[in-house]
């Protein structure tokens, strides 16, 4: 289970979404299909998917990465929530980059069915949304 404090965002209702799909051609599934599924699920949870985060909001805006890789009869689906962080190295030099605060993945067979992949994606989205909403609802609303 994720540490819920790492999932808390002041502006959690706006969520940048990035999808990548790498398929070997054995299964007909597109980036647009995955993007549509993810955005629909977020909207159902009253979360607004965004294509990018303005620089002025980078410290308060989460980013959701969804990656699908299909090789032969197997698929790997990974969901990762990231936030922008800064730190100071032991030598005093500053560091900054995106860091992962929640991640889950599954490796399954797909049986040459894109609906099987979508079902596995739905299961991961359920887990993410459950943790993400539990961490944020009540803290941000009056």
Image (cartoon, rainbow, N blue to C red):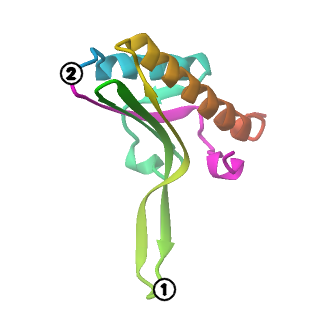
Q: Are marks 2 and 1 in contact (CB under 8 Å)?
A: no
Q: Could you say which is closer to the camera, residue 24 or residue 5?
A: 24
Which residues are drawn in magenta? 1-24
Residue shown at 78%/34% (left/top)? 142
**Which residue, given by chain and number where applicable, does mark 1 sit on?**
90
Q: Could you say which is closer to the camera, residue 117 or residue 81?
A: 117
x and y, in percent, of residue 73 in the image: 34, 24
Q: Residue furthest left?
A: 25
Whether residue 109 sits left or right of residue 14 in the image: it is left
Label 1, residues with CA under 10 Å away: few <14, some 14-19, many ≥20: few
Residue shown at 61%/26% (left/top)? 126
x and y, in percent, of residue 132 in the image: 64, 37
Quarter of the image for the N terminus: give it. Answer: top right
Tag 1's secondary structure? Answer: loop
In the displayed structure, 140 sits above or below 96; it is: above
**Which residue, given by chain and number where applicable, does mark 2 sit on?**
25
């Amino acid at each position: 289970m994720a540490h819920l404090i790492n999932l808390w965002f002041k502006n959690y209702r706006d969520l940048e979404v990035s999808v990548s799909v790498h398929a070997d051609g054995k299964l007909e599934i597109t980036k647009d299909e995955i993007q549509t599924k993810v955005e629909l699920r977020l909207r159902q949870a009253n979360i607004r998917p965004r294509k990018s985060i303005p620089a002025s909001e980078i410290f308060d805006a989460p980013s959701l990465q969804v990656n699908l890789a299909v090789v032969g009869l197997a698929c790997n689906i990974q969901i990762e929530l990231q936030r922008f962080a800064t730190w100071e190295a032991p030598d005093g030099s500053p560091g900054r980059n995106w860091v992962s605060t929640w991640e889950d993945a599954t490796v399954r067979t797909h049986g040459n069915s894109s609906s099987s992949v979508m079902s596995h994606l739905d299961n991961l989205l359920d887990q993410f949304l459950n943790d993400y909403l539990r961490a944020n609802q009540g803290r941000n609303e009056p």
